[in-house]
Amino acid sequence: MDFKIKKTTPEKIKTDALIVPVFEGAVVGSSVDSLSEAARDSLNTALKQGDIKGKAGDLQILGALPDTPAKRIVLMGLGKASEQSASKLRKALVTTATALTKTAAKDAALLLDEIQIKDRDGQWLARQVVELFSHACYRFNDYKSKDKQSKINLKKLTLLCDTDNKAVEEGIKIGSAVANGMNLTRDLGNTPPNICNPSYLAQQAKKLAKDSKTLETTILDEKQMKELGMGALLSVGNGSATPSRLIIMEYKGGPKNQQPHVLVGKGITFDTGGISLKPAPDMDAMKWDMCGAASVFGAMRAVIDMELPLNVIGVVAAAENMPDGKASRPGDIVTTLSGQTVEILNTDAEGRLVLCDALTYVERFKPASVVDIATLTGAVIVALGPFASGLMSNDEAVVEALQAAADYTQDKVWRLPLWDEYQEMLDSPFADMGNIGNAGPKAGSITAACFLSRFTKAYPWAHLDVAGSAFSGGATKGATGRPVPLLTDYLLRQLPA
Ligand code: BES
Ligand code: MN
Ligand code: ZN
């Protein structure tokens, strides 16, 4: 989708759909004052009819008004004018964009100046609009035999605004980069697991490198990983017919001696659970077990688009978890790249096994920070639902930056503790640690992160458990593109002032 900014008034704009914010009590703001009397009368008559109250998420589409070139008027409820908020605006934008995708409108225009949210500027507003409209216009039809082409007509949105054009312009730029990143993340996530396997992900990295002079890719195959001693990562792919890969993407946008920020993604291209086999219902959802990896690709895409003057490294630990004669068994003990040994008590706790070796591997980059992103535990869905990613960390500065980025982007996180008491739950009588907590499902997300924390002592680190946020089931089944907005904003916050 294309986004533009224009300094004009609503009676002049030629558009298929003019989006007019409506506040509670069915009131419209002063942006429509320049419409002709006949147009205002007709708008007021429609508002008085009472079909739209102006609550956030309310929506009504009218035909054209007199003396006004816009073909449709879209009334977008925003709630009380004095109580505008980020969450209400997001709800309104999603409703509006979704409704517009079902019309024949090819372009739309939004009266931006009516939207006034405390402590949020034009850049923020533009980013929200761009990200949410792009999100609503996303379709994944590559694998339909007919109708491969998107059936959505909406291709362009004009932001009508009088003030703060520079900030809005910047917001469109960043928002578009984030939206493109999210689209890539969603595409990779939604691609079926018989296509999207570890070498397919490796190909994606090469594709990104082709598009950018600043990106270098290295792919490690199983032989190379064996030589390094990545016994934990390799054990996960033992049962799979498609070999594991470690994918490294180095973006060198900053000065040579500047320490890089590293993103590490869990890339389990399908998680059957292995010998600790998962139940059959909804197992197809485990094709999204590479969404952490997909978000690393998405964030790298955004970094490239923004030409961020920063050194950023994306690493993807890619494997497929299958049951087989060669698969790991519960009770197996493997040696990690760090030298620590792990008793595999449950082969379905495989994410931490691929991540631990990737997290040791990245020590060599002397990172300024490392953030890993993983659909790691069902327990985080129980704790936080789809709204927030679980955040666990050994560093307060990284936590603060991620929390600030989450608040800004509304790509939310919630921190969980990593206290010593939880560490003891990983004790094993036979190896340095087990791969699951010994109190069953209790504190499952935390024990998983405690496991990772034993491999991340060399640098400031945070773990994002995105099992609830990265994809959704039900009517909106598919990858969400999260946490690309969060990661991108986190990286933007690392730019030297
Ligand atoms: N990929 C799953 C976690 C998951 C579950 C992601 C549901 C998305 C939706 C992970 O590999 C897993 O199986 N975790 C186990 C860990 C347990 C065996 C300690 C879980 O959460 O049940
Ligand atoms: Mn699993
Ligand atoms: Zn998994």
Image (cartoon, rainbow, N blue to C red):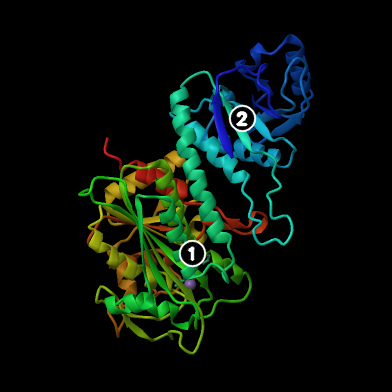
Question: Residue 448 appears at what percent x and percent y?
Answer: 39, 67
Helix, strand or loop under label 1: helix
Query: Given the current orientation, which residue lies at the most extreme left position?
Result: 257
Name the one closer to the observer, 137 or 454: 137
Label 2, ligand 1: CB separation under 8 Å: no
Is 472 situated above or below 241? Answer: above
Residue 201 shown left or right of residue 51 in the figure: left
Tally the marks.
2
Label 2 CA crowd tier, 10 Å (few <14, some 14–19, many 20+): many
Query: Given the current orientation, which residue lies at the most extreme bottom position?
Result: 325
Helix, strand or loop under label 2: loop
Residue that badge 1 annotates: 290
Residue that badge 2 annotates: 79
Question: Residue 2 appears at what percent x and percent y?
Answer: 57, 36
Residue at figure coordinates x 59%, y 29% from the top left: 158
Q: Is residue 405 visible?
A: yes
Q: CA distance from mark 1 to mark 2?
A: 38 Å
Is 167 situated above or below 325? Answer: above
* Amino acid bearing label 2: Gly
